[in-house]
Each structure stands twice: as C-alpha cells, then as structure tokens.
Image (cartoon, rainbow, N blue to C red):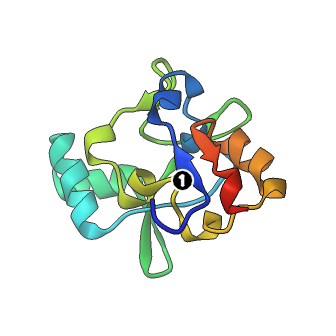
Amino acid sequence: MNNFNFTFNATACNTCGGKCCTGESGYIFCSITEMEQISAFLKLPFNEFTQKYVKKVGYKFSLIEKPYNNEYACIFFDKETKKCSIYDVRPKQCRTFPFWDGFRDTTSEDYELLLKMCPGIELDKKDM
C-alpha cells in the first residue's frame, strides 16, 4: 500500500489464529450497505441480522463481540477454524487491516506491537 513503511504477507493469515479478530474489546464498524451484504450472505432478514449481531455506537454501527480466551472476538470469528466466517463480505475495517491511518508512520519501536497484532506485517526498514 502507498505511504506505509511496511508491507503485508497474506500467507501469514493461514497460521495466525485470527489475531486481528480477537483481543481487547473494541468496535468493528460497518456501514448500512455492509450490514445489508452480511445479512444477505447469512440469508437473514436485515432486521433480524441487526438485532442479533449489531450494536449502535453513537451515530455508527458495530458488529458485536463475544468472549474468547479471556478477551473478546468478533461475533463472526469461528473459534474452530480460527478464521472469519463472513470473510467474503467482511466490513471495510477488516478488509483494510493493517493498512489503517493510525499505522501509517510505523516506527521500529512500534514494530513489535504491530507484529503481535499481525504476523503478516513486514517492516520496510529502508523507509525508517
């Protein structure tokens, strides 16, 4: 991705165990369009989907979380396969990870923290 001092090796997802889907509690924001796509993918009426899987956060919407290994996981994290059960229609927030603005200027000090969150990150040391 442009303007990031790291790259992403997607093959790491095969053995990562879903680190980007689990951890501390947070928000998994999604748009109404994304919620419509997920509800269609799950073959659930939109109202049923939102009542079961979505919470309102201010003026935004977030997928809910579930307890997982003394922390939390996205409701669509499959604990058996350790993968996303809605991968093909996952929200933009998930599709763009780890290329979020907050990680744009990763320093070598931040690198270890980023690796804990995502073993697919490969720091481009020449840009540091």
Mark 1 sits on what residue? 98
As drawn, 77 above or below 114: above
Q: Residue at x 45, y 19 (%)?
A: 81
**Image coords of residue 3 (percent x, y):** 52, 69
Q: Residues within 10 Å of mark 1 (few under 14, many from 20)?
A: many
Relative depth, front residue between 113 and 87: 113
As drawn, 128 above or below 19: below
Quarter where residue 22 is shown? top right
- The furthest residue to the right: 109
Q: Quadrant of the C terminus?
A: bottom right
Relative depth, front residue between 39 and 1: 1
Q: Residue at x 71, y 52 (%)?
A: 125
As drawn, 62 above or below 82: below
- The furthest residue to the front: 126
Relative depth, front residue between 64 and 123: 123
Relative depth, front residue between 39 and 19: 19
Q: Amino acid at mark 1?
A: Pro
As drawn, 38 above or below 128: above
- The furthest residue to the top: 80
Quarter where residue 62 is shown? bottom left
